[in-house]
Amino acid sequence: MTLFTPNTKVGMVNHVGIAVLSLEESMKQFQELFDSPESEIILSEENGVRGTFINQGDTHIELLQPIRDDSPIAKFIKTHGEGIHHMAFTVPEVDAKAEELVARGVPIIVGPRPGLSGRIAFVDPKVTHGVLIELVRPYGT
């Protein structure tokens, strides 16, 4: 299923989101094992997470730690344990891409809305082989 228009072409992998129990321990592990650079911690009370984006080569690794038991990341960890939560792809216009997908019968389960790294929307993993796909337009682009 492809939608190819100038405003909604899906670009490169922006980041891989990983749910973790301890942000500091996970950051330290990535720094030690993969020579990852230090990164800034971002708090999102609204989404119930603390996170960071590790610049790892041509993409980023987003580490997400829940700060509340009712957050999506806390629920994910409770069900699946720590691990890959989602893959994010860069799009020029999140709202336009989400509208096009919905028009084609592809459900958007969250968003479009502001996220940690930009404007985001999540595609229902039931239509993407169990993989939670995030569409993101990074801030400043």
Image (spheres, rainbow, N blue to C red):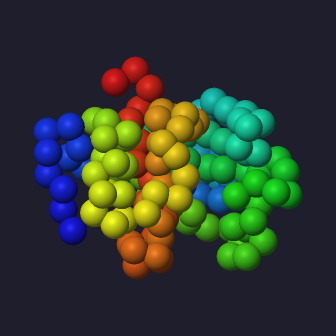
Is residue 107 among what the camera can see? yes
Query: Farthest residue toward the front?
Result: 103
Q: Is residue 109 left or right of residue 81?
A: left
| Nearer to me, 89 or 100 | 100
Quadrant location of residue 2?
Answer: bottom left
Does 32 sit above or below residue 72? above
Quadrant location of residue 136?
Answer: top left
Quadrant including the C terminus: top left
| Residue at image coords 20%, 37% | 7
| Nearer to me, 104 or 110 | 104
Does 82 sit above or below residue 46? below
Residue 43 x/y as whole percent:
73, 34
Does 106 sit above or below residue 7? below
| Residue at image coords 76%, 45% | 48
Residue 87 x/y as whole percent:
44, 58
Is residue 58 among what the camera can see? no
Residue 57 x/y as whole percent:
37, 44
| Residue at image coords 52%, 46% | 111
Query: Farthest residue toward the top?
Result: 140
Residue 125 x/y as whole percent:
47, 70
Quadrant including the N terminus: bottom left
Q: Total marks drawn?
A: 0
Q: Is residue 91 left or right of residue 114?
A: left
| Residue at image coords 28%, 51% | 100
